[in-house]
Amino acid sequence: MTRTPGSDLEQSGAVTPPRPLLGDLRELILQARISVARAVDSGLVTLYWHIGRRIREDILGQQRAEYGQEIVSALGRQLGLEFGRGFGPRNLFRMIRFAEVFPDAEIVSALRTQLGWTHFRAIIALDDPVKRDFYAEMCRVERWSTRALEKKIQSMLFERTVLSRKPAALIEQEIKALREEDRLTPDLVFRDPYILDFLGLKDTYAEKDLEVAILREIEAFILELGVGFCFVARQQRMQIDARDYYLDLLFYHRKLRRLIAMDLKIGEFEAADKGQMELYLGWLKRHAVEPGEAEPLGIILCAGKSQEHMELMGLTGGDIHVASYWTQDLPRAELERRFHDAIRLARARLEQSED
């Protein structure tokens, strides 16, 4: 027999509590449980960091590498027996790695308010310190779940941001501003390419099919765009003189405090696409931007683009971002090859322009 909360009271003829009050009390209990769980997780993060730092200072920093590992394994076996598997050898080595790649206690203290131990486990596995800082800060600001973080690492989110194409010193500056001021820039938000494999598009489709598929999967599409995007309108009408123009999709980004115009193209980027987007942005600036908002930005989402076109038309920065999209995901090795080549070429062009 299935019992429901309060069923015993109701069957016994006792006074039935008011449903609104009962619902509120249940919500209070559930919220308290969540808060306690977060507090415990936050406390564990701090504990694990201190354990990792202490072992590094007392053992690994003074002993031969092999002997130090033997001591850590012995510690893990003993602590595991006393306090459970969470303190076994494998996790102790993770704690050491944690203290090694996050040596600043203040940074760890700021991150642990949003990141649990499972978040840190995914991040400390990364070898590149810039990537670790990027994922840690974006996870804090956008409040990703562990599953979301792992998916973004797997899809090589960092390599797909505009930021990754910049020299390392500029990347570190932007991440530092994000850490200290919560300042999110378009280079951290915009990506290239966008992976739209969830749309289920076949080999041949029209722009209308792409738009309809995006609207059908709008939640997944916004997740791919990134946290902060809010859908505003489809086929936004813009009346200029005696003509009507229609913008495919209009979004608003809460962190950037800007309208984001999106134009969808099923073919390669064409020079005329820039002029069309400039017209859309001009109209939005005049008729749609509210006081206190920054000027609108544009995304031209197309099947492909020429780097020479981007450079000659001044589209490597500014208010218009041209990005390609993939309707099918690629194997990890192919993703890495493409993104690393793109980053290398972009940084080389930046260095040449500075000479």
Image: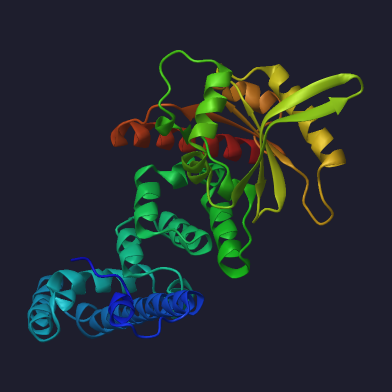
**Residue 355 visible in the picture:** no
Give above or below for 1 relative to 352.
below
Name the one closer to the observer, 161 or 143. Answer: 143
Residue 260 found in image quarter: top right
* Picture coordinates of residue 233, whole percent (x, y): 68, 37
Give above or below for 87 relative to 272.
below
Q: Residue at x 69, y 18 (%)?
A: 271
* Picture coordinates of residue 111, whole percent (x, y): 46, 71
Task: Looking at this view, name the residue that lies furthest to the right.
Answer: 241
Q: Residue at x 40, y 85 (%)?
A: 15
- Work out which quarter of the rendered image holds the C terminus and state it: top right
* Picture coordinates of residue 134, whole percent (x, y): 47, 57
Judged left or right of residue 330, residue 316 is right
Judged left or right of residue 205, residue 173 is right
Judged left or right of residue 170, residue 156 is left
* Picture coordinates of residue 232, whole percent (x, y): 67, 42
Judged left or right of residue 116, residue 270 is right
Name the one closer to the observer, 280 or 236. Answer: 236
**Residue 126 visible in the picture:** yes
- Work out which quarter of the rendered image holds the N terminus and state it: bottom left
Q: Residue at x 23, y 86 (%)?
A: 58
Q: Residue at x 71, y 28 (%)?
A: 247
Task: Looking at this view, name the residue that lies furthest to the top.
Answer: 204
